[in-house]
Image (cartoon, helix red, strand yellow):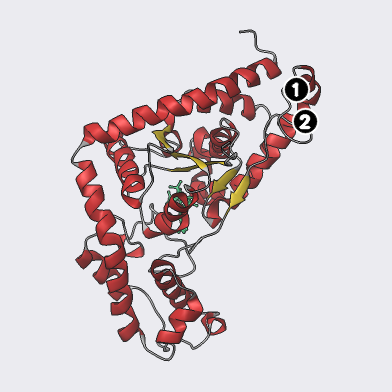
Amino acid sequence: MSKHKPRVFSGVQPTGNLHLGNYLGAIVRFVDLQEDHDCIYCVVDMHAITVWQDPKELMKSTREVTAAFLAAGIDAEKHIVFNQSRVSQHAELAWVLNCTARIGWLNRMTQFKEKAGKNREKASVGLYDYPVLMAADILAYHAERVPVGEDQKQHLELTRDIAQKFNNDYAERIAELGLGRTEDGGFFPLPEPLIQGPATRVMSLRDGTKKMSKSDPSDYSRINLSDDADAIAKKIRKAKTDPEPLPETVEGLEGRPEAANLVGIYAAMAGVSKEDVLKDFGGKGFAEFKPALAELVVEKLAPINAEMKRLLDDVGYIDSVLKNGAERARAIAEPIHADVKKIVGFLD
Ligand code: AQP
């Protein structure tokens, strides 16, 4: 008999400039988890439009993220890869969960504050509601584990709070219908964040205190998965550093965010610890470290970059992967959502 494999769900927004942070913080983890989990990986196009997206660019970026998933080693036959807008249960469940989540909870979300900035009154309602849609993405599949970067931790906590409140609010009804699925009779399992892996928070190459981000106006702040060898080498050469040589110990990286970031990237890309990196490079200057880092990053990203290009030449194939994935995702989400409707009391 085959053993139950925990269900994993995660997503990446098709907002262009897929970067090393997305790769190390999320995609590498997605690949690793395939072995002993049932994985659902989603290109979250509905999240993307919470800030303005040019429609043609959105279509292109959706295919690019899909190509990155496949090129990095996600198996879209054994697991599920699809784009969010194709499965209507995400939006439908988000509405129900909007009525569970509290405004006070959303007001505490730091990502909204950062992204809306001073222009809060002009931010879209979707941007404010983003975390509820994210809760729906996860809960629509009763996913148990969610691999994300450090920046998504608060949203995951909110997802758990929403799931718990739904379970409490409807406890009697869930019991009456015999729809309890968790040990304490709840309908939604509380998903566990997996914030692990080689680099849960890759920082900007221009400012070691800011995370590497798709929306940073400076392209020199990030290494894009689509960058060629010359661009990668140039960006690493120009990366901000301090004048000191690298320390001999990890403690010596404290208070040196740029040095810590570059050592972290090296360790993650080489699959070794920061201690190991400092064993080789401690006492050496950046003039020696940066070319070695550039060589390593190019070596690791070049095959992914080449495979992405190859896949993107065949848009028909990419689209067929997404369509097929959406059908299989829908087959999981539909019966769960039918139960949600019964629990809430919608006539069907
Ligand atoms: N710098 C990062 N280090 C580690 N992990 C990161 N992630 C993002 N940036 C880093 C993780 O990548 C996954 C997909 O992210 P996303 O596209 O859904 O949204 P995001 O977090 O908003 O990504 P960006 O690049 O930071 O975009 P903008 O600039 O629009 O804010 C997530 O698991 C995320 O944690």
Q: Which mark is residue 339?
A: none
Q: Residue furthest top?
A: 348
First in sequence, mark 2 or 1: give its number.
1
Residue type at tag 2: Gly
Q: Residue furthest left?
A: 313
Residue type at tag 1: Ile
Identify the residue shown where x is 58% and y is 37%.
143
Q: Is residue 216 visible?
A: yes
Q: Is the Cβ of the residue at disc 2 closer than 8 Å to that at disc 1?
A: yes
Gap between marks 2 and 1, in whole Å? 8 Å
Q: Residue furthest bottom?
A: 283
Q: Is residue 108 visible?
A: no
- The quadrant holding residue 167 is top right
Q: Could you say where residue 123 lies in the image, as x and y percent from the top left?
A: 49, 39
Tag 2 secondary structure: loop
From the image, tell me which residue sits under label 1.
174
From the image, tell me which residue sits under label 2.
185
Q: Could you say where residue 230 lies in the image, as x and y percent from the top left?
A: 20, 67
Classify the position of the N terminus by image quarter: top right
Q: Could you say where residue 214 lies in the image, as x and y percent from the top left?
A: 38, 53
260 to 91, vertically: above or below: below
- The quadrant holding residue 255 is bottom right
